[in-house]
Amino acid sequence: MSGTGEGQGENSGKTVTACVLLIGDEILSGRTKDSNLSYIAQHLNRIGVQVREARVIPDIEEEIVATVNEVRAKYDYVFTTGGIGPTHDDITADSVAKAFGVSIGPDPEAMALLQAHYAETGGEFTSARQRMARLPDGARMIANPLSKAPGFRIGNVFVMAGVPMVMHVMLDSLLGQLEGGASMLSRTLTAAIGEGSIAETLGEIQSRHADVSIGSYPYYRGREFGTSIVMRSVDSAALERAEADVAQMFEKLGVSAVAGEKS
Amino acid sequence: MSGTGEGQGENSGKTVTACVLLIGDEILSGRTKDSNLSYIAQHLNRIGVQVREARVIPDIEEEIVATVNEVRAKYDYVFTTGGIGPTHDDITADSVAKAFGVSIGPDPEAMALLQAHYAETGGEFTSARQRMARLPDGARMIANPLSKAPGFRIGNVFVMAGVPMVMHVMLDSLLGQLEGGASMLSRTLTAAIGEGSIAETLGEIQSRHADVSIGSYPYYRGREFGTSIVMRSVDSAALERAEADVAQMFEKLGVSAVAGEKS
């Protein structure tokens, strides 16, 4: 139905798109399992912003610059995670500044926040830590109540930390700034039956419900197997009609279907 | 050191690159947390193939075609997961055929395998299931001992299932076909100290060890925090020298460092 953010009633029919950029060698090497993408996607979805693509790229300036410039032109919003700490491999802020063709330097407000934070916690406000108070020209801070070093927004690009706890508080603080579109609603029905037994009927159901995207996801748990059917639409009435057809399909096959989380 | 695959001695100095394409709306909606990327990256790394980029794209033909064509030109290998089942939303095989400009049709060997499998398990070999035996012209099957429906290789693109258990057996069966390069070795040292306290020294260490990529990864566990330093290089002697310098840095700061998994 309509977007849930403030003052977004007029956007209820619009599709608002986003791309997520996960920046970091550690994800590409397999050392770190990313959990940020699904978190961001779920939270954006609730306010009517649909993640259409995600990329994982290394800590290499030219890759970050080229990718940011490609995807910020293609999607309504871009969200990055990673590479904004104090060490030599934290090059996201500089790379994003370069992508926008602007300079980067210490932000007085961010400097004051970090200075106060380290004074309070007894840490030294080293020049490395001062790097975290640098913002591209024209950027606005994204608050970080947890560890203070801010993210930032420039144009339609939101730059956040890679550490999940810190990313979560940053995302919380920026969701109110986004213009959402129509929220994607979903219904799930799961049954202990293989995909191959329902594929044809499901294909026919999909062809009758053009406004609903129907996905089929097989699962295996030891010797058990089955299929989850996920139906997604911005139109709740269309969604209910598709759900009824899928439920009827399972009924005719004599298998019981379990409804999953609605959103 | 040298690649670990058979007959790969002559490639030991070469960098072999890969891109992973995760295909599926369910990952972009946040419904499914991907675990395939880290698995693939770790296994490729062991045979000297470095994942340089990963993308998550939706089940939309034009997106798959464009992305496959972009990345197969850019990297030595491309690995896809997802979208090769029997249902209407499984469009990866057709899209990859289109990307290569070839036709797609039933493969006699794959048909025979699947027919025997369903005869044995008592399932009907429906036309939907027969879709899983279709291969692009010029493709070679990737074996799937688990549920029989094969993946395939065409050119430098390897098309695998999205279900992790099935992807794992497919990856196992194809690793022997890859030409690896120099294996990336790694060392990790973790200490209970903030990034900001080591950033400057670490930056100096990085500048003295150009052959080693040094990453700094902060962590928070409740009230505890610390930093893991990950050093990566194809040169084991260079790696040991960098590790010694990082260990000395922690020693001078009076914090004890714990060595992580070596690879």
Image (cartoon, coloured by chain):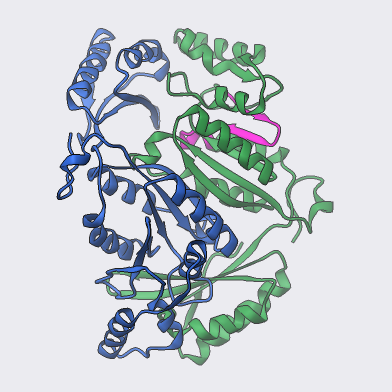
Chain colours: A green, B blue
Query: In the depicted view, which residue is nearer to us: A197 or B13?
Result: B13
Q: Is residue A257 magenta?
A: no
Point 24% across, 71% down: residue:
B145
Tell me residue B117's x, y (percent): 28, 84
Residue B53 visible: yes
Q: Describe residue A261's horizontal placement relative to residue B82 as left or right.
A: right
Query: In the depicted view, which residue is nearer to us: A84 or A177?
Result: A84
- On screen, residue B15 above or below A134: below
Q: Name which quarter of the figure residue B194 lies in.
A: top left
- On screen, residue B196 above or below A1: above
Q: Describe residue B236's horizontal placement relative to residue B147 as left or right.
A: left
- On screen, residue A3 above or below A26: below
Q: Is residue A158 magenta?
A: yes
Tell me residue B174's x, y (percent): 26, 59
Query: In the depicted view, which residue is nearer to us: B128 or A158?
Result: B128
Name the image quarter holding the C terminus of chain A: bottom right
Per the rendered image, the range of residues in magenta is A150-167
Tell me residue B148's x, y (percent): 29, 75
Q: Residue furthest right?
A: A10
Point 71% across, 74% down: residue:
A238
Point 47% across, 90% down: residue:
A253
Residue A125 visible: no
- On screen, residue A102 above or below B128: above
Tell me residue B109's x, y (percent): 29, 80
Q: Describe residue A249's horizontal placement relative to residue A241 as left or right.
A: left
